[in-house]
Image (cartoon, rainbow, N blue to C red):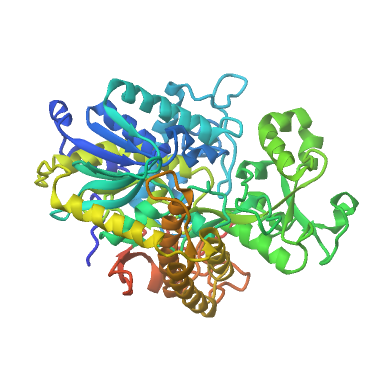
Amino acid sequence: MQLDAKIPSGPIQDKWDKHRFDLKIVNPANKRKFDIIVVGTGLAGGAAAATLGELGYNVKNFCIQDSPRRAHSIAAQGGINAAKNYQNDGDSIWRLFYDTVKGGDFRAREANVYRLAQVSRNIIDQGVAQGIPFAREYGGQLANRSFGGAQVSRTFYARGQTGQQLLLGAYASLSRQIEAGKVEMFTRREMLDVVLINGQARGIVTRNLVTGEIEKHAGHAVVLATGGYGNVFFLSTNAMNCNVNAAFRAYRRGAFFANPCYTQIHPTCIPVHGTYQSKLTLMSESLRNDGRVWVPRNPGDKRPAAQIPESERLYYLEEKYPSFGNLVPRDVASRNAKEQCDAGKGVGETGLAVYLDFADAIRRDGQDVIGRKYGNLFQMYEKITAQNPYEMPMMIYPAVHYTMGGLWVDYNLMTTVPGLFAMGECNFSDHGANRLGASALMQGLADGYFVIPYTIGGYLAGGNNIEDVTTDHPAFRDSVGYVQDRITRLMSINGKRTVDDFHKELGQILWDYCGMARNNDGLDKARTMIQGLRAEFWENAMIPGKTNDVNQSLEKAGRVADFLEFAELMVMDARHRQESCGGHFNEGFQTEEGEAMRDDEDFCYAAAWESKGVDADPELNREPLEFEHVKLTQRSYK
């Protein structure tokens, strides 16, 4: 299939303005005639639902939590990027655009990234107007700090609670529209299918997680803002409820899935400490502003940190990357931590950790200053590890955090299914093969507040012959039948192995063979193992309880069933991409210095996979990526 990204013509600086002018506009009096379904209430979904309601559309908003404000966006602690250049340190829209394209290892779409950099400035204004308590300098101007992959300070923050505060802002706007009757809120609902009529997305089927009822909802367009799929690894920094269901069901209905092998491994997480662990905790990347990363210079040195003299410490990031030091991008920092641990220099009981040391910063600025910057993060670390990071270095290790792959979308954020849109982490478009820190919040809010309100109007007013339909349409009956058949099949397995046990094994397969480093033999082995595990799941999974009641085992079973299919797609994508780029590191393709080595001649494209059914291999479609403004070069942070 020939993919059309619908990138506007003209200079990159003018594309978004030109596109907004060219898009058809829905008359304000006609907006109330359109019903829009938004699935997800994080920064992308909440912002979109609030804004579309404010514009006058009738919005139905769905989430699996008991409140929109419990979306996983709340966990994004460190900050949000914006090209405001308040520090006069050389930042600009162009530099943010450049850093993002380079940071993504030249596997993102230039036009989308430039628009993201442009819109980033509006987000801060919106947040301030909403009362977000951004940190401020002495003179009252908003403060900034640095994040990985940038040499300027462009990250706005509210201590270590930025995601939480931004989500509260979006939630307040959303609540206003709920009260006004423009947004109808559906909590504790899980989307289980997209309904297509005449090839257009016209509704969804959900399961009420409290009563078990299967529900039908019709609309003129459907917007998915359901986050990423990092929980496929079982252990990740994601909330336990995060899943791939909505995106994967859309994939099964014809939406292409792009770059599923791009997983971000975050370098600053609390290490795994036991076999019964179900969750990993992220320590904000902002800590690398003042914390210094080091390991013992000699392999096997198990002395406590305080007993290792300065001359016997290896500040490997500072030595290897003198320009960026501890602020190298996440993929680079993660691979280097693994390299040191593989060389026997890891610290802690398992040897799978490195130090993040604040001793120099405390000596330089004082404990009060460091506490004001990171106090809540230090407190969280101490509660989890029972160690005081003011007195001894933190121990950190990389962990699965974010996924750059997602549903393929064009410049309008529309998938290959007309009327089906995807935003935020749910789509693939803005981060390439690696996301820079503080850019997730930026994309979610940009898509929700400032992109979808224009592009969905262009779709609705664009002569797409969107007739009114109701849930009595046969397509809804068929979809409900499909969903109920799947639930019945799950409940009839009556096996002896828990769903969590399958999920753990799947996660270990992916971590071992499709994690921080991959190779062709391992990927081939992983695919076979996943197929075997999936077959066993449908023979031996144990799902207690009933369908017409609260049943978390059933919820998990549906998600793990999708993960088992999706994981094979991940592995296939990683196996076909015979290069290394960003979060995809195939050991067979690396420079002499161990950096990711791209193959721009053969793989400079987005890989968009088209489902051909459960038992058939998907078809690979390619969207060529053109780099007119940021020259394709080997990434260097030295």
- The residue at 78%/42% (across/down) is 386
Instruction: Give the side of residue 332 with respect to residue 467, left or right.
Output: right
Q: Quadrant of the C terminus?
A: bottom right
Residue 531 position, x and y percent, is: 44, 74
Q: Is residue 631 above or below residue 529?
A: above
Count up the numbered dots: 0
Among the 4 quarters of the image, the one containing residue 256 = bottom left
Residue 588 position, x and y percent, is: 54, 77
Q: Quadrant of the N terminus?
A: bottom left
- Residue 626 visible in rendering: no
Among the 4 quarters of the image, the one containing residue 404 = bottom left
Q: Is residue 466 above or below residue 515?
A: above
Q: Is residue 165 above or below residue 620?
A: above
Instruction: Give the side of residue 160 with respect to residue 626, left or right.
Output: right
Q: Is residue 555 above or below residue 579?
A: above
Q: Nearer the viewer, residue 199 or 115?
A: 199
Outermost residue toward the top in this view: 139
- The residue at 35%/43% (across/down) is 115
- The residue at 54%/27% (across/down) is 134
Q: Nearer the viewer, residue 245 or 149?
A: 245
Outermost residue toward the bottom in this view: 521
Residue 269 position, x and y percent, is: 64, 50
Instruction: Give the side of residue 326 with respect to residue 634, left or right.
Output: right
Residue 212 position, x and y percent, is: 36, 45
Q: Nearer the viewer, residue 314 or 350?
A: 350
- Residue 589 visible in rendering: yes
- The residue at 55%/47% (across/down) is 150
